[in-house]
Image (cartoon, rainbow, N blue to C red):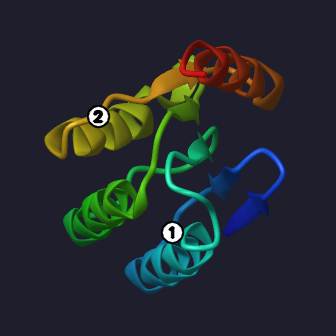
């Protein structure tokens, strides 16, 4: 299960990927995400909520890396990933993927904490 929600006023994307996501759904998520990101202004921020995401297959990981790479090319700025300690394998998989293309996501334990981190990071850059 996934959703990708735009917040045009804040120039942010809130994405959530939950549970076991097969390759077909991972590709559908990626296509939807990249289409929506193009509606944001360069420098947009992303909140990735993966609290209950189960680690994906190698093919799914390749989709994840390519999605992250394209998001960066489109103009992605700050990224906060919502994770929990009990889901460290999935969190590590996403962080390794993002590091491989040159960025590290900040981490938070809730949507409220993620929003606060982005608010602070964006105010520093103004």
* Left or right side of 63 for 62: left
Outermost residue to the left = 100
Q: Residue 57 has which mark?
A: none
Q: Is residue 123 left or right of residue 73?
A: right
| Residue at horizontal 35 percent and vertical 54 percent from the top | 72
- The residue singled out by tag 2 in the image is 103
Residue 125: where, in percent of width, then height?
Answer: 54, 20
Query: Where does residue 82 sit, x and y in percent of width and height?
Result: 62, 32
| In this view, 34 is above or below 17 | below
Check the image and name the residue furthest to the front: 126
Evaluate whether residue 20 shows in this view: yes
- Rendering coords of residue 39 (x, y %): 64, 72
Tell me if residue 21 comes above or below residue 97 in the rendering: below
**Along the viewing direction, whichever of 80 and 110 lies nearer the viewer:** 80
**Label 1 crowd bin: few (<14), some (14–19), many (20+), radius 10 Å:** some
The foreground one among 72 and 1 is 72
Residue 126: image quadrant is top right
Secondary structure beneath disc 1? loop
Q: Is residue 106 above or below residue 101?
A: above
Q: Earlier in the sequence, mark 2 or mark 1?
A: 1
Badge 2: residue crowd in 10 Å (few <14, some 14–19, many ≥20): some
Position of the N terminus, as image quadrant, is: bottom right
Q: Position of residue 17 (x, y in %)?
A: 60, 57
Question: Judging from the image, what secondary structure is the residue with disc 2 in?
Answer: loop
Left or right: where does residue 27 sit relative to residue 35?
left
Residue 97, quarter of picture: top left
Relative to 80, residue 65 above or below? below
Q: Pointer 1: what residue?
A: 21
């Amino acid at each position: 299960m996934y959703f990708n929600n735009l917040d045009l006023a804040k120039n942010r994307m809130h994405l959530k990927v939950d549970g076991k996501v097969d390759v077909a759904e991972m590709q559908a998520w990626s296509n939807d995400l990249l289409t929506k990101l193009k509606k944001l202004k360069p420098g947009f921020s992303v909140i990735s909520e993966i609290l209950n995401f189960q680690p994906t297959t190698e093919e799914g990981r390749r989709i994840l890396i390519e999605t992250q790479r394209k998001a960066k090319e489109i103009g992605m700025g700050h990224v906060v990933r919502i994770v929990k300690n009990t889901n460290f394998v999935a969190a590590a998989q996403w962080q390794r993927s993002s590091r491989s293309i040159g960025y590290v996501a900040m981490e938070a334990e809730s949507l409220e904490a993620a929003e606060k981190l982005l608010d602070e990071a964006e105010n520093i850059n103004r």
